[in-house]
Image (spheres, grey):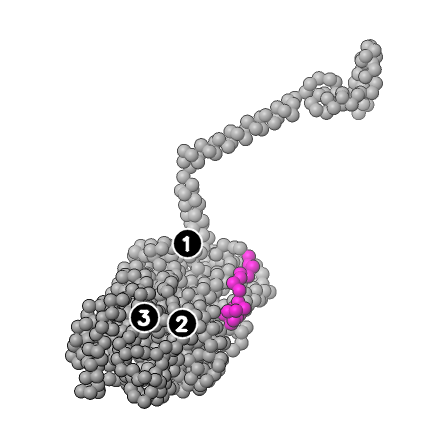
């Protein structure tokens, strides 16, 4: 230490001595100047030697290296030296393989019985009973938030997203459920409903809560398969997650009407005749609103059971379905690999994979269920009813196997019932639903489905009994209420139907926020003089069910010009109008002749549209089909009309004579669709007492003149004259429909 100090001191003295040898140096050696200190600081040395590179050199080398890096990056990108897609694909495959390996190794630690090892299992093992309680509390909170959303009135419900942790799908099943719930809400608001010609008829987008069930099974499937989040190609999307069912009331009976399915533009499927006499033979699409492959599945019905307690409802919906029995857990890796193909939209490969699994493991319920799902998907892809019938049979095979988990049994039979309805096999679907109710008698959602099944075959009485039974057990079941109210209204029990329809809609339960129920609630209120009718029409409009308060048709094509009254020039059908007005006497005389010679051809209006009076019609064309027997009574009129395909080919309209006798009042009502316009040619018009209102404008008929209006707007008719009124009704396609749409839209 002393030696080091001396050396240091020597250095100082040497410097000082050196400075004294020169006068100029001595003057600066004793106390160094600021300039000297600055030089030492910036690269000099204490002894005056220049040590190491300067600051400028460092900066220069830094810039050289930076520029080299930039130009290297540019060269890599410009000359495509690296295949980034291949790198990403390999990384993704590595993740999949690692996931499969880990699942295979850790499957023995499955603590919650879902067939795999996931975050929930880890929390159970690490946290113990207290951890389980915490997890349940968290799940309950998430669920309560989701289930409370549908009940919020539209005017108050601003779209928002609850903050939640961002985590991979396979790491946090709760996030998947929240996403599924958001999809459920969007699906419910994207529904497009159809109504038949009758006042009580309407198109049902889905029965009970199928969209809800399908999204919930998507969640379930993703929990089972970490790879379920893979994107699906546009061409692999399914039509079945929004099957359409139609209730149609004729003489107070609800009858099945063809499924207006899929929303894939201008696709037509012909359904072959089957075992059901009331089954209809056409399935057509209208608006485009298709969900991806993952959304085609459903959840066990108990997860959609309506309960009075919101907390209990949240717990019920939170239940994680169990699809794997003990044996299927041992082959889960193989099942996941096949399911991954299906989720990626590789349908043919997935079919072959599941067929091989069924061959190897014929007693595996999950493998057979996967085969049924793939056949279901393939039927959509190929637009094949034959393939779909195969899927229906495979769903039945799943249910017939031994040791099928209860959740999987429900899923299989529910899907079988849905697919049977899609093909128009209403009675077969009803038998499947009856079996479900027998197997799970405490599941009210299955009974709700059964009630719909009865409605679809026109059995209102049994449907009514089912909903009465449901309401006796769960009096606040909103789905049962709206359907029970609908049945009462169909039975002309107008006042009695109102509270059920109203309370059912207000419940916010799945399947109740439907334009049909707003339509019939408002109509019932109008008929009893309740001024709240337009409040409900307005609410239906705000929720997207009606185009406006006045225009309340349920079976629409978006974007068509909408106005209550039209001029011939606006329609573009001036030649048709001129022909009708030029030949009005010929048309009148043939109509009067039919009245005089065969009064039985004029049939009373049977759509329950009259408050009072006598109103009959004689139809020449219906749904684009000529009535040959009727045209024998008016041959010249029919020949005249054959020149105008815009009316004879209008499969959403009619051509008919309409006679209304004094003292008749027709309730305010709307037609089923915005795809047509209606022409009224005056034939025999009393001088006073006859008028028609469409929206807020009222007009009168003139003999030999044509009135044109859009009957999807609310309209009302009064006949207070002293003699009958005779007009000729001619429906035409909406002029803005394309030729493709006119060919493909289903008949009404």
Q: Which is nearer the eye, 411 or 673?
A: 673
Mark before the other along the chain sequence, 3 or 1:
1
Please report the residue visible at 42 percent of the width from the left and 80 percent of the height from the top.
Answer: 523
Please report the residue visible at 22 percent of the width from the left and 68 percent of the height from the top.
Answer: 644
Residue 453 shown left or right of residue 66 in the figure: left
Q: Is residue 461 above or below residue 218?
A: below
Range of residues picked out in magenta: 147-165
Is residue 707 among the parts visible in the rendering? yes
Q: Is residue 121 above or below residue 517?
A: above
Task: Determine the CA span between mark 3 and mark 1.
Answer: 46 Å
Task: Determine the CA span between mark 1 and mark 2.
Answer: 41 Å
Q: Which is nearer the eye, 80 or 629?
A: 629
Task: Determine the CA span between mark 2 and mark 3.
Answer: 13 Å
Residue 681 image-quadrant placement? bottom left
Q: Quadrant of the C terminus?
A: bottom left
Q: Which is nearer the eye, 543 or 171?
A: 543
Residue bearing the label numbered 2: 551
Residue 388 image-quadrant placement? bottom left
Please report the residue visible at 43 percent of the width from the left and 48 percent of the height from the top.
Answer: 92
Dot 2 surroundings within 10 Å: few (below 14), some, or many (20 or more)?
many
Residue bearing the label numbered 3: 677
Residue bearing the label numbered 1: 230
Mark before the other along the chain sequence, 2 or 3:
2
Residue 613: image x %, image y %? 33, 88
Is 158 contained in the magenta span? Answer: yes
Residue 706: image x %, image y %? 29, 74
Q: Nearer the viewer, mark 2 or mark 3?
A: 3
């Amino acid at each position: 230490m002393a030696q080091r100090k001396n050396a240091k001191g020597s250095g100082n003295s040497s410097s000082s001595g050196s400075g004294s040898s020169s006068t100029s140096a001595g003057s600066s050696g004793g106390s160094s100047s600021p300039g000297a200190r600055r030089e030492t600081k910036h690269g000099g040395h204490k002894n005056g030697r220049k040590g190491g590179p300067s600051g400028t050199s460092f900066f220069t080398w830094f810039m050289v290296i930076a520029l080299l890096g930039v130009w290297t990056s540019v060269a890599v990108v410009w000359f495509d030296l690296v295949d980034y897609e291949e790198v990403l694909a390999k990384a993704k495959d590595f993740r999949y393989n690692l996931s499969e390996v880990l699942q295979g190794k850790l499957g023995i630690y499955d603590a919650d019985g879902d067939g795999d090892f996931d975050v929930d299992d880890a929390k159970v093992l690490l946290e113990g009973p207290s951890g389980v309680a915490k997890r349940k509390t968290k799940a309950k909170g998430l669920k309560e938030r989701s289930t409370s959303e549908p009940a919020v009135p539209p005017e108050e419900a601003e779209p928002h997203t609850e903050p939640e942790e961002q985590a991979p799908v396979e790491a946090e099943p709760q996030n998947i459920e929240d996403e599924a719930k958001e999809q459920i809400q969007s699906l419910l608001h994207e529904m497009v409903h159809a109504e038949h010609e009758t006042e009580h008829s309407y198109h049902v987008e889905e029965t009970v809560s199928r969209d809800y069930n399908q999204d919930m099974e998507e969640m379930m499937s993703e929990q089972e398969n970490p790879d379920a989040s893979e994107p699906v190609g546009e061409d692999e999307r399914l039509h079945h997650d929004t099957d359409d069912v139609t209730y149609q009331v004729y003489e107070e009976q609800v009858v099945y009407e063809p499924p207006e399915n899929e929303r894939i533009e201008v696709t037509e499927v012909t359904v072959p005749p089957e075992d059901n006499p009331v089954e209809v033979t056409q399935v057509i699409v209208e608006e485009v609103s298709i969900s991806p492959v993952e959304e085609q599945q459903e959840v066990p019905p108990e997860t959609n059971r309506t309960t009075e307690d919101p907390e209990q409802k949240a717990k019920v919906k939170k239940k994680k379905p169990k699809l794997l029995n003990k044996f299927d857990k041992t082959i889960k890796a193989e099942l996941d690999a096949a399911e991954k193909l299906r989720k990626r939209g590789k349908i043919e490969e997935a079919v072959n994979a599941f067929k091989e699994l069924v061959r190897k493991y014929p007693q595996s319920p999950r493998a057979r269920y996967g085969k049924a799902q793939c056949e279901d998907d393939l039927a959509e892809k190929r637009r094949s009813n034959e393939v779909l019938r195969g899927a229906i049979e495979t769903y039945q095979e799943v249910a017939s196997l031994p040791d099928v988990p209860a959740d999987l049994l429900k899923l299989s039979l529910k899907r079988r019932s849905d697919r049977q309805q899609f093909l128009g096999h209403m009675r077969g679907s009803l038998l499947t639903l009856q079996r479900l109710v027998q197997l799970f008698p405490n599941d009210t959602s299955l009974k709700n489905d059964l009630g719909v099944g009865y409605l679809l075959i026109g059995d209102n009485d049994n449907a009514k009994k089912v909903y009465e039974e449901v309401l006796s057990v769960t009096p606040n079941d909103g789905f049962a209420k709206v359907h029970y109210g609908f049945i009462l209204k169909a039975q002309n029990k107008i006042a009695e139907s109102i509270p059920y329809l109203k309370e059912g809609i207000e419940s916010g339960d799945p399947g109740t926020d439907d334009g049909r129920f707003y339509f019939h609630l408002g109509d019932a209120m109008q008929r009893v003089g309740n001024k709240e009718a337009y409040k409900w029409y307005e609410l239906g409009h705000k929720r997207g069910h009606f185009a406006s308060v006045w225009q309340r048709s349920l079976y629409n094509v978006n974007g068509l010009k909408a106005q209550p009254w039209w001029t011939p020039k606006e329609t573009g059908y001036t030649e048709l109008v001129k022909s009708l007005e030029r030949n009005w006497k010929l048309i009148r005389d043939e109509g009067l002749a039919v009245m005089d010679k065969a009064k039985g051809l004029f049939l009373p209006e049977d759509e329950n549209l009259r408050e009072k009076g006598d109103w009959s019609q004689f139809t020449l064309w219906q749904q684009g089909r000529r009535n040959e027997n009727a045209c024998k009574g008016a041959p010249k009129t029919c020949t005249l009309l054959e020149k105008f395909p815009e009316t004879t080919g209008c499969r959403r309209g009619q051509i008919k004579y309409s006679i209304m006798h004094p003292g008749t009042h027709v309730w305010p009502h709307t037609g089923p669709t915005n795809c047509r316009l209606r022409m009224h040619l005056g034939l025999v018009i009393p001088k006073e007492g006859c008028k028609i209102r469409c929206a807020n404008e009222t007009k009168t008929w003139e003999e030999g003149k044509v009135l044109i209006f859009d009957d999807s707007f609310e309209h009302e008719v009064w006949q207070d004259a002293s003699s009958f009124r005779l007009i000729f009704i001619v429906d035409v396609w909406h002029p803005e429909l394309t030729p493709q749409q006119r060919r493909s839209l289903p008949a009404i």
